[in-house]
Image (tube, rainbow, N blue to C red):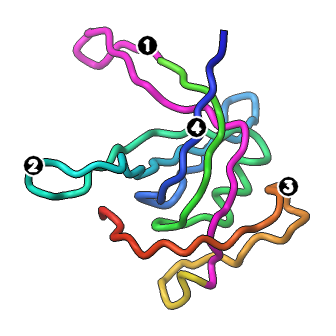
Amino acid sequence: MLNSVVLIGRLTKDPELRYTPSGKAVANLRLAVDRGTVNQQGERETDFIDIVVWERQAETVANYLRKGRLVAVQGRLQIRQYTNQEGQRRERAEVVASTVRFLDSARDHAGGEGTAPAPRRDEGMGSELTFNDDEDVPF
């Protein structure tokens, strides 16, 4: 059986970093990913996908990524079940990332407040790539 997901999109907000009671870092991201089709009104359709990143990579994305940054995520789809405050069982789909690649640099977002420096090659994220994206961001 195979459970593999590869996504390229832009962050809809800054990553949220927290730690489990045992001290493991976990970051939550939301990625806006184009479907590549347009609806009846001629507008591009976009999916918003929740991403979970663990341990050192979670700390790295929290330190270097900000809203609007272009990233590639490779991981697996996970359906998490929980009970809400009203006692109803709910399910939530999310991607658990094994790799997060930065596809643009912080320099591309210069002038924005809270822009973090570009990662160095030795940060464990692989080589940095430049991606020219002239399309509108849906946020």
- Which numbered marker is on residue 52? 4
Taking the spot 57% from the left edge, 82% from the top edge, the residue there is: 108
Secondary structure beneath dot 4 equals strand
- Which numbered marker is on residue 40? 2
How crowded pointer 1 is (Cα within 10 Å; few <14, some 14-19, many 20+) is rated as few
Task: Indicate whether residue 4 is drawn in magenta.
Answer: no
Q: Which amino acid does label 1 sit on?
A: Gln
Principal SS element in the magenta part?
strand
* 106 over 46 or under it: above or below: below
Q: Do the residues labelled 2 and 4 touch (CB within 8 Å)?
A: no
Residue at the disc numbered 1: 81
Q: Which of marks 1 and 3 is nearer the N terminus?
A: 1
How crowded pointer 4 is (Cα within 10 Å; few <14, some 14-19, many 20+) is rated as some
Residue at the disc numbered 3: 124
Which tag is nearer the camera, tag 2 or tag 4? 2
Q: What residue type is labelled 4?
A: Val
Q: Give the range drawn in magenta.
A: 80-107
Task: Name the spot of residue 22 as percent of width and height, x first.
Answer: 75, 28
